Amino acid sequence: MLDREKIPAHIAIIMDGNGRWAKAKGVPRVAGHNAGMMAMKEIVKASSQLGVKYLTVYAFSTENWKRSAEEVGGIFKLVVKYVNSELAELHENNVRVKILGDYTQVPKAAVDSLEKSLETTKDNTGLQFNIALNYGSRAEIVRAVNLIEKDRKTGVLDPDMEITEELISRYLYTGVENGNIPDPDLIIRTSGEERLSNFLLWQSAYSEFGFTDVLWPDFTPAEFERMIEAYQNRERRFGGRK
């Protein structure tokens, strides 16, 4: 049984399987992404109700630009659709939206919608909903190192300051600029694949992983709770012993 007193503070999800779901149903891939968006809506709602403090979803990776222009364009149209249709409810439910990744490089309509969501929800204090968009973890780490070097050269940081894990963490997307998001307790990947795919590589050092064969559009709040329950039955040692 799910223990409501032991809900993980930060859950991250690799939402995988939209394309396979669409293929199995004989519909365009964009229809699969649309179904995936609806699933995401339900998981955001469930996270808020369960008391999850941070939910991070992998919406679009730096590698996803390799897909067809039609599919990429369709994904960003869905971003606009999601924000336009769900922003009022997110705000009403005290959800705060944050973006991880260089979202300024996506189509302007999507940028405008995302910035509207950031501005509208900036003072909310409930669930922090992090959307990883145009995000790649290796690029994130390289960016952090370059920002540190820049700040050392310009005097923001002491040029002789030692480079530590804590310092690098501060300069990641999950660092100071987005409120010092704690590392994920649980990372879920749907569709049967069992890899990180360049997602939160630094932050996942001691995360627990949950894999399911369920394709993302079919991932329900009930399945979400089942995976949280499985997480609660594990013993986390963080490299030590109990």
Image (spheres, rainbow, N blue to C red):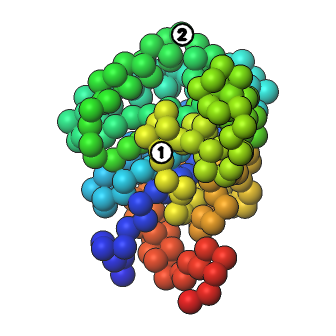
Above or below, 185 against 23 in this view is below
Foreground residue among 193 and 129: 129
Name the secondary structure under disc 1.
loop
C-alpha gap between disc 2 and disc 1: 27 Å
Relative side of 1 to 139, left or right: left
| Residue drawn 38% across the image and 44% down it | 128
Q: Amino acid at mark 1?
A: Asn
Name the secondary structure under disc 2.
helix
Q: Which residue is mark 1?
A: 180
Residue 153 quadrant: top right
| Residue drawn 42% across the image and 19% down it | 115
Q: Which residue is mark 2?
A: 108
Residue 193 quadrant: bottom right
| Residue drawn 47% across the image and 45% down it | 180
Disc 2 vs disc 1: Cβ atoms closer than 8 Å?
no
Neighbours of disc 1 within 10 Å: few (<14), some (14-19), many (20+): some
Number of numbered discs present? 2
Relative side of 154 to 46, left or right: right
Above or below, 93 against 154 in this view is below
